Amino acid sequence: MNEIKEQFGDIDIYLFDQLLKGRFQSCKRVADLGCGKGRNLIYFLKNGHEVYGIDSNPDAIREVQSLAAGLNTKAATEQFIVGNIDRNLPFENGSFDLVICNAVLHFAKDKTHFEEMLKAAWSLLKPGGYLFARLATDIGIKNLVMPLPDGRFLLPDGSERYLLSVEMIAKYNLELNATAYEPLKTTVVDNLRSMTSWCLQKN
């Protein structure tokens, strides 16, 4: 158990699942949008991937810069920056094999903001590249959430989130011309919130 912890850290279990399946073996260049302190990047840093990250929290970026420097001598501090996920991302479009966007998209202020973040993430991918997104949805708790303005909802746990439905996800799959490389997987936590893994490959 300690060896697994050392190799993968506190990685999201659904991202861990994809690594165990060998899904991202050929992914050399990885971007984590909303990277926080880097909990999902330990494996990639340790195994020689070229890793980039962005987060709006300066303290988190300082920590992930330190983490990267300790795990991968090739990682430069300027690869991890303070910023927002929008059309002005300071990374080259079409240059990443894998983009991670874990527990970020549901903080959208409205539909326009959500689509800007989604399209920004998608634009970074090379053809054949993978998007791994995990976000709040109404799946399994549709009758328990309270609509608010701008596509946001009040969840039973007291939080406010921008939620997608199955139908909205299907619509975006078509608009992005994307292929789902994994079926939607949703965890309903004690009828308080619902988190879905949305896994797309760029055609």
Image: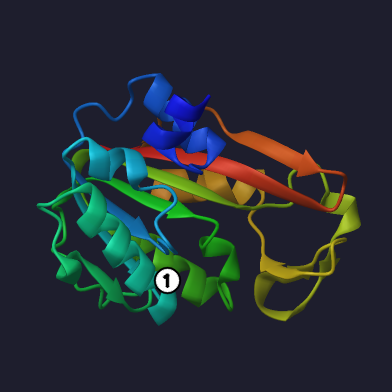
User: Residue at 35% of width from left, 71% of height from top?
Assistant: 61
Direction top: furthest residue: 21
Using residue 56 as the reference point, say whether residue 67 is left or right of it: left
Which residue is depicted at the point 39% across and 56% down? 38
**Residue at mark 1:** 60
- Which of the 4 quarters of the picture holds residue 36? bottom left
Residue at the extreme front of the image, as rendered: 2
Tell me the residue at 70%/71% (across/down).
152
Tell whether 112 sits left or right of 137.
left
Image location (x, y in percent) of residue 113: 48, 75
Percent position (x, y) of residue 130? 31, 39
Figure check: 48 above or below 110: above
Q: Is residue 3 left or right of residue 67?
A: right
Quarter of the C terminus within the rendering: top left
Q: 159 above or below 94?
A: below
Residue 118 at what x, y percent from top left?
Answer: 41, 61
